[in-house]
Image: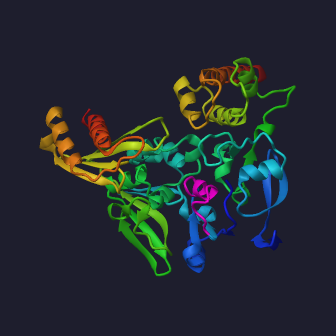
Amino acid sequence: MKPVRFKYRAPATVADAVQQLAEAGIDGKVLAGGQSLVPMMNFRLARPAVLVDLNGVAALAGITVDGDHVELGALTRHQAIADSDRLQHALPLLAQTARLIGHWGIRTRGTIGGSVVHADPSAEWPAVLTALSAELELVGPQGAHRVPAGEFVLGPLTTAIGMDEILTRIYIPRVPTVRTAIEEVARRPGDFALAGAVVVASPEDIRWTFFGLGGPPETVRLSADDAQDEASLKRQLADRVAALEVTGDMHGGADWRRQVAVVVALRAWRQVAA
Amino acid sequence: MTVKVGGVVTEELEITLAVNGHDERVTVEPRWLLSDVLRRECGLLGVHVGCEHGVCGACTVLVDGEPVRSCLMFAVQAAGHQLTTVEALGTVDHLDPVQQAFWEAHGLQCGFCTPGMVLTARALLDRDPHPSEETIREALAGNLCRCTGYQFIVDAVLLAAEKRADGAEAGA
């Protein structure tokens, strides 16, 4: 249960980090909060030869709120998001989400950027950022570019990030006319979600973005008229969820997960409808 | 610095860890976990190593006052941060109020999870001096105990909150 030997790099700037990652080539790996990578290294499932530790890059931390946007440094810890009064006011869904992640001792280290790039199917952030139409800033040797969060996760543990790129910042638009909520089912609080749903309700439509179903976040959209009574909403959600690709595992089969997905979608809906 | 260990060339780094209020100069390989360095290099055997993959919480230490799993952090990453292990809390003759409460409320049996529990409880009370039972359960959810069934641990933290409040009054 000890990692193999690796070379340690501790850059202070994004430019240095990008250069060190490029020099490391295919043997390099970025270390953010380490709450998924280090267990994998302890098990020796991951054996990077060079570890580029981003924790000393001051430019990657921090929460900025203005009238139109919330901007999060990729290295912002889950607990900092959960504790932020400014975020609680500007985008309460973020704080609500952060509190669902892992345990306290995980949230104090784990980062939003690390979670998004790790792209575990049960992770909350990829779904939340997709639901909120966030954009991710990636920086590589060719410079910076932005990718919509909804196009970032390609599959389990697989994203659109280049091998030589680093996720630096996350831009989330503030839309005052929408109501939002998140619900999930886990075996114990802090465990990985077995199924979860983020709801974003506008006056015109309601979108549910699901996570924990085995693949990338999946979004289902219904019109506001479809949600007039709950029995019919439940039938329509069940129909739409039946069409999603869902993978079962030892904690529950695919059909069971579909049922749970409908349950959490309705619970989230009740929060915003109340 | 590059050295040869058992025929393998490896990197070694000299770092300073601020542990329990004083600086420890240690030489580490980058791959050494903070939990192992605290135990082997600093002799702090109150850092209990359980699962070594972030599930059990036994190796919890405080980094800048916040609970962190020391098995999921490399020692090199801890340089520049204030580390607190259970050794800093109290002595056998003068227990910290949290330790005293664990004793009185029977918040431990085998004791393996106790340092992690006590440190997490201490960090919680520093942040929220009068936590509800629900808050306590949530804060300790990341620390596994296979003996107590948790109720006595929750009772101990509630008692510790009372003791700390009494202590603050007495000191005022």
Queried whether the magenta region covers residue A30, the answer comes back as no
Image side of residue B38 versus residue A10, left or right: right
Q: Residue at x 81, y 27 (%)?
A: B95
Q: Residue at x 58, y 73 (%)?
A: A27
Residue A161, quarter of the rendered image: bottom left
Query: Residue farthest to the right?
Result: B93
Q: Residue at x 55, y 23 (%)?
A: B133
Residue A171, quarter of the rendered image: bottom left
Queried whether the magenta region covers residue A42, the answer comes back as yes
How many marks do you count on the picture?
A: 0
Magenta range is A35-48
**Does B139 sit above or below residue A69?**
above
Color style of the picture: rainbow
Is any part of residue A250 visible from this angle? yes
User: Which one is nearer the viewer's eye here, B170 or A38?
Assistant: A38
Image side of residue A192 versus residue B146, left or right: left
Query: Residue farthest to the left?
Result: A225
Point out residue B111 in the picture as x, y percentages from the top left corner: 73, 30
Point out residue A139 in the picture as x, y percentages from the top left corner: 48, 73
Residue B135, quarter of the rendered image: top right
Q: Quadrant of the C terminus of chain A?
A: top left
Is any part of residue A202 visible from this angle? no
Image side of residue A17 versus residue A3, left or right: left
Q: Residue at x 60, y 24 (%)?
A: B149
User: Which one is nearer the viewer's eye here, B103 or A91?
Assistant: B103
**Does B22 sit above or below residue A56?**
above
**Does A154 sit above or below residue B117?**
below
Point out residue A93 in the picture as x, y percentages from the top left corner: 38, 45
User: Which one is nearer the viewer's eye here, A196 or B130?
Assistant: A196
